[in-house]
Image (cartoon, rainbow, N blue to C red):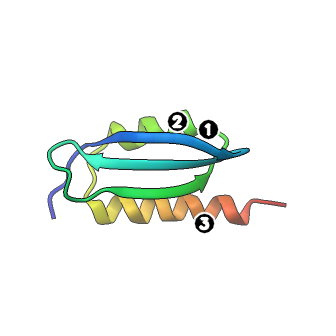
């Protein structure tokens, strides 16, 4: 798998701190990532995602971890 930079196709608030993200690699539209996650600092998360090189699998594992962390942090 090739590591590449990703860009944000769309991002919107679903409710409260829940965000829906659609990401794609900058070089192709073949592998879109569509995920809903909870974060209180969406700007830092997006900056980290777009400024690093990821394989699609690495990025999904990272975002799934963030989504799980958000679900478990709800009191």
Residue 10, percent across and down?
43, 40
Disc assigned to residue 68:
3
Disc assigned to residue 44:
2
Viewed as shown, does residue 16 lie left or right of 23?
right
Of labels 3 and 2, earlier in sequence is: 2
Q: Is residue 66 above or below residue 43?
A: below
Which element type, helix, strand or loop, lies under badge 1?
A: loop
Disc assigned to residue 41:
1
Query: Observer-nearest residue: 22 or 5?
Result: 22
Q: Residues within 10 Å of mark 2 (few under 14, many from 20)?
A: few
Discs 2, 1 touching: Cβ within 8 Å: yes
Residue at the image point whose x is 66% and y is 58% from the top: 70
Viewed as shown, does residue 67 lie left or right of 30?
right
Residue at the image point whose x is 47% and y is 48% from the top: 21
Q: CA distance from mark 1 to mark 3?
A: 15 Å
Q: CA distance from mark 3 to mark 2?
A: 18 Å
The quadrant of the picture occupied by the C terminus is bottom right
Which element type, helix, strand or loop, lies under badge 2?
A: helix
Residue at the image point whose x is 31% and y is 42% from the top: 52
Residue 47, percent across and down?
43, 35
Query: Observer-nearest residue: 67 or 13?
Result: 13
Of labels 1 and 3, earlier in sequence is: 1
Query: Observer-nearest residue: 10 or 37?
Result: 10
Which element type, helix, strand or loop, lies under badge 3?
A: helix
């Amino acid at each position: 798998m090739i590591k590449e930079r990703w860009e944000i196709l769309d991002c919107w608030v679903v409710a409260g701190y829940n965000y829906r993200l659609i990401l794609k690699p900058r070089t192709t539209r073949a592998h879109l990532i569509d995920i809903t996650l909870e974060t209180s600092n969406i700007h830092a998360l997006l900056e980290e995602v777009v400024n690093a090189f990821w394989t699609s699998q690495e990025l999904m594992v990272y975002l799934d971890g963030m989504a799980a962390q958000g679900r478990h942090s709800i009191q």
